[in-house]
Amino acid sequence: MPNLPPAGKLLGLDLGTKTIGVAVSDALRYTATPLETIARTKFTVDAARLLELIADNKAVALVLGLPLNMDGSEGPRAQSTRAFARNLRQKTPLPIAFWDERLSTSAVTRMLIEADTRRDRRAEVVDKLAASYILQGYLDRLRISP
């Protein structure tokens, strides 16, 4: 885990090929809240929106979901996420952490199905809820780490 400021909001990202789910933590880092889903276009446009969200929420660090393979290895999607982070580091000095996102989208989808959410509504919210799920996992880990 990178050196994070001791307090302040974190922004969580679930990078998909078509969308970026965004979530934000509270300043005390207890809870993650879904924020929005960004439709991906070009990196510069996506990054500009992320920088707006960072400023609007006064975020002090970013947490990106890292899509590892089931055996823990990194495949093309994880490499793409790391490349996105490298490019984003050129636009912001904020620390960027990675969090294993295996099964996050399927866990959120399962929760939405159990809540009897319509398929079209699930498609609208799954990415930002997955970002919240990823960020909450990271926050929980921060609380139990020394």
Image: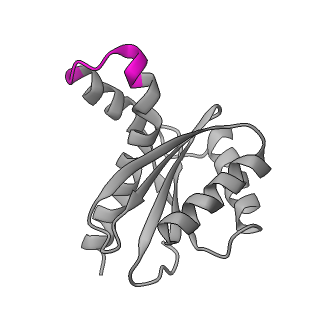
- Whether residue 56 is visible here, answered yes or no, is yes
Q: Residue furthest bottom?
A: 6
Was residue 58 drawn as part of the magenta stretch in this picture? no
Of all residues shown, which one is farthest toward the front?
Answer: 56
Residue closer to the observer: 60 or 135: 60
Q: Nearer the viewer, residue 38 or 95?
A: 38
Q: Is residue 118 magenta?
A: yes
So how many labels did they put on this image?
0
- In the rendered view, tell whether residue 90 sits above or below residue 43: below
- Residue shown at 70% from the left, 54% from the top: 47
Task: Name which quarter of the figure residue 18 lies in.
Answer: top right
Q: Residue at x 28, y 63 (%)?
A: 140
Q: Residue at x 28, y 20 (%)?
A: 117
Relative placement, left or right, of 56 versus 104 is right
Q: Nearer the viewer, residue 137 or 68?
A: 137
- Whole-percent x and y of residue 110? 29, 26
Magenta part of the protein: which range?
114-122
- Where 51 falls versus 49 (above or below)? below
* Extreme residue toward the top, this view: 119
Note whether residue 75 is visible: no
Picture colour scheme: one colour
- x, y (%) of residue 79? 68, 47
Q: Quadrant of the C terminus?
A: bottom left
* Place of residue 43 in the rendered image (x, y in percent of width and height, measured from the top left): 76, 47
Nearest the viewer among 44 and 56 is 56
